[in-house]
Image (cartoon, grey):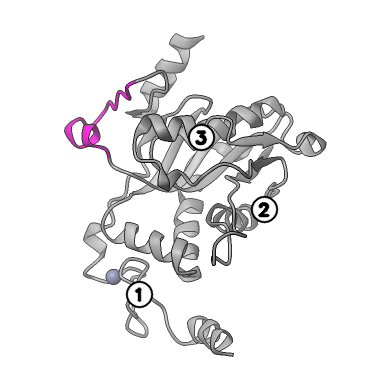
Amino acid sequence: MKKIFSVLSDIFFTRRCPGCGNLLPVLEENIICDECRPDFTDISDKLFYVSELEFMKAVYLFSGPPRHGLHRFKFRNDGSAGRFFADRMYEMICKEKFLDTDCVIVPIPGNVKDTDREYVQAEFLGKRIARKLRVPFVCDVIRKKKSVRSQTKCRTFAERKKNAEKAFILNKENAEKVNGKTVLLIDDISTTGSTLSSAAAVLKKAGAERIYGICAAKTPSLRERKSRYIIPYPDKMKMTMVNINEVEKIKKSKD
Ligand SMILES: [Zn+2]
C-alpha cells in the first residue's frame, strides 16, 4: 500500500532531482535542481573506442550527482532516477545516425534474484529506450553465467577484465533476433568497457552486424583527468577518447 502511494505521488504530485533525490518545486521547469545541475558533466559528445564495439558513448561522467542518482537507481529501486537516465540516453542516441539501419536494443544481462532489487538496471533502461525508439527489445540472446561475480566486487582492471571474459553465454535458439542487425548494447555504468566488450563478442557470434555501447555514465580514470583524448589501458583492450573523425581514422587504419 505504501509502495502504491509512493508510485502515485511520484506520477501526480512530485518530481525529484535525479542527482540529490530532493523534491523539485512544483512547476519548476528544470529537471535537475540548481545545486546539482553544474555537476552533471555531460560527455555525450565523446566517443570511446572499446574492442568488439564500433564505439561506446555515455551521457555523464560517473561522479558527483549522476553517481548518486545511479546509486539510488541501482541499490534503492529509485525508478524515477532510472527514467531520467534512460531519457537522456534516448536523446543521445537520437543525435547519432544509428537508426537508418535495422536496429535492436540489447541490455547487459544481470542477476536480480540474489538481491533485493526490483529490476536489472540495464533492462530497465533498455526497455524504456526501445519503447521510445520503437525498436525491438531483445533480452534473451545472451545471458550471464551463474557463477560470475559482480564487476563492482573487482578492484583492479585486470580482475575486471578476467571476470568479464566469458561472463556471458549465447542462447543459440534466439540468435536470429540479432543476426544481421545493428545492436545498441545498453548498460548503466561503464568502467573499463570490459563488460560491454565481452557481451559484444558473444553477440557477434550470434551474427550481430555492428554493435554500439550506450551507457548512462562512464567512470573517470586518473589518466582521463590528465589527458583529454587518450586513455591507454595497459593491455590489448584499448579504450580511447576521441572525436568521431578520429574513430573513422582508427577504423580505416584497422581495415
Ligand atoms: Zn539535486
In terms of secondary structure, where does tag 2 sit?
loop
Residue 189 vs 157, above or below: the answer is below
- Mark 2–mark 1 Cα distance, whole angstroms, equals 27 Å
Q: Which residue is mark 2?
A: 134
- Magenta: predominant secondary structure element? loop
Can see residue 98? yes
Q: Residue at the far front: name it.
A: 147
208 left or right of 74?
Answer: right
Quadrant of the rendered image holding ligand 1:
bottom left
Q: Position of residue 172 (x, y in %)?
A: 78, 33
Q: Residues within 10 Å of mark 2 (few under 14, many from 20)?
A: few
User: What is the quadrant of residue 183 in the picture?
Assistant: top right
The amino acid type found where label 1 is placed reads: Glu
Reading the image, the residue beneath label 3 is 164
**Image x and y of residue 84, in percent:** 45, 63
Q: Nearer the viewer, mark 3 or mark 1?
A: 3
Q: Nearer the viewer, residue 16 or 190?
A: 190
Tell me if residue 215 is in the magenta stretch. Answer: no
Say whether disc 3 or disc 2 marks the residue closer to the N-terminus. 2
Given the image, on which type of amino acid does mark 2 rest? Arg
Mark 3 vs ligand 1: CB below 8 Å: no
Q: Which residues are magenta?
A: 221-234
Figure disc tally: 3
* Residue on which disc 1 sits: 29
Amino acid tagged 3: Ala
